[in-house]
Amino acid sequence: MADENSIFIGGKPFMNYVTGVVMQFTTKGAEEVIVKARGKFISRAVDVAEVSAKRFLAEQVQVKGIKIDSEDFENKEGREVRVSSIEITLGKK
Amino acid sequence: MADENSIFIGGKPFMNYVTGVVMQFTTKGAEEVIVKARGKFISRAVDVAEVSAKRFLAEQVQVKGIKIDSEDFENKEGREVRVSSIEITLGKK
């Protein structure tokens, strides 16, 4: 899947992301959009996916798959930290 | 699946939940454990599932399925609020 179909969730206003998802499906004609997030933004990614699929694109789009993962890395203090991530694939019905 | 195999993630110390998951599989011999959360605790549920499956029960347990959902309800002020939820099923390999 091309990267342009991914929406990476961060700290911008919530509706920016929902609009981004909706535009991918409508004006850009995407068949699938992947909503991605790491760490504390995972909850928000689920919100974005649910609001997009159930409120704005109801009858048209559904959750096609969900993957979670995590990776270890060293933070600035040299401590090992595990950060989780999620990828939610939305697709046309 | 019986309710006793579900772990509902909230604001308790992180390792309480990981220990809960590990104990279900080890001392209680569960074949599957479902990690559940709503709202802001969704990120934490992913962390609990990842740490349980990859650090404490590596080689034994893996993510078998993930579901997300959301429901509308009215808050105290009479405003409609949508709250997302997640269910992560961990199972023996």
Image: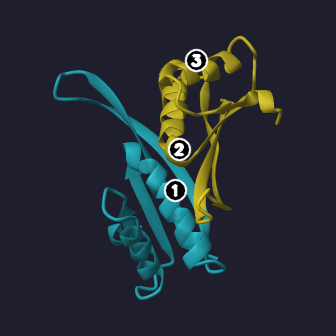
Chain colours: A cyan, B yellow
Of helix, strand and loop, which one carries label 1? helix
Q: Are marks 2 and 3 on the same chain?
A: yes
Q: CA distance from mark 2 to mark 3?
A: 18 Å
Depth check: B61 or B22 in front? B22
Mark 2 and mark 1 in contact (Cβ < 8 Å)?
A: yes
Residue B58: image location, x then y, percent: 53, 23
Q: Residue visible at 55% across and 78% down?
A: A56
In the visual, does A10 lie left or right of B83? left
Of helix, strand and loop, which one carries label 2? helix
Q: Report which residue position mark 3 lands on.
A: B19
Residue A33: image location, x then y, percent: 46, 70
Residue B42 has which mark? 2
Q: Report which residue position mark 1 lands on.
A: A46
Q: Are marks 3 and 1 on the same chain?
A: no
Earlier-in-chain disc, 2 versus 3: 3
Chain where mark 1 sits: A
Depth check: B83 or B6 in front? B83
Q: CA distance from mark 3 to mark 1?
A: 25 Å
Q: Residue visible at 17% across and 23% down?
A: A77
Question: Which image quarter is the N terminus of chain A in?
Answer: bottom left
Residue A75 has which mark? none
Q: Amino acid at mark 3?
A: Thr
Q: Amino acid at mark 2?
A: Ile
Q: Are marks 1 and 2 on the same chain?
A: no
Within-10-Å neighbours for mark 1: few <14, some 14–19, many 20+: many
Q: Is residue A37 visible?
A: yes
Q: Amino acid at mark 1?
A: Val
In the visual, does B3 lie left or right of B41? right
Residue placed furthest toward the bottom: A27
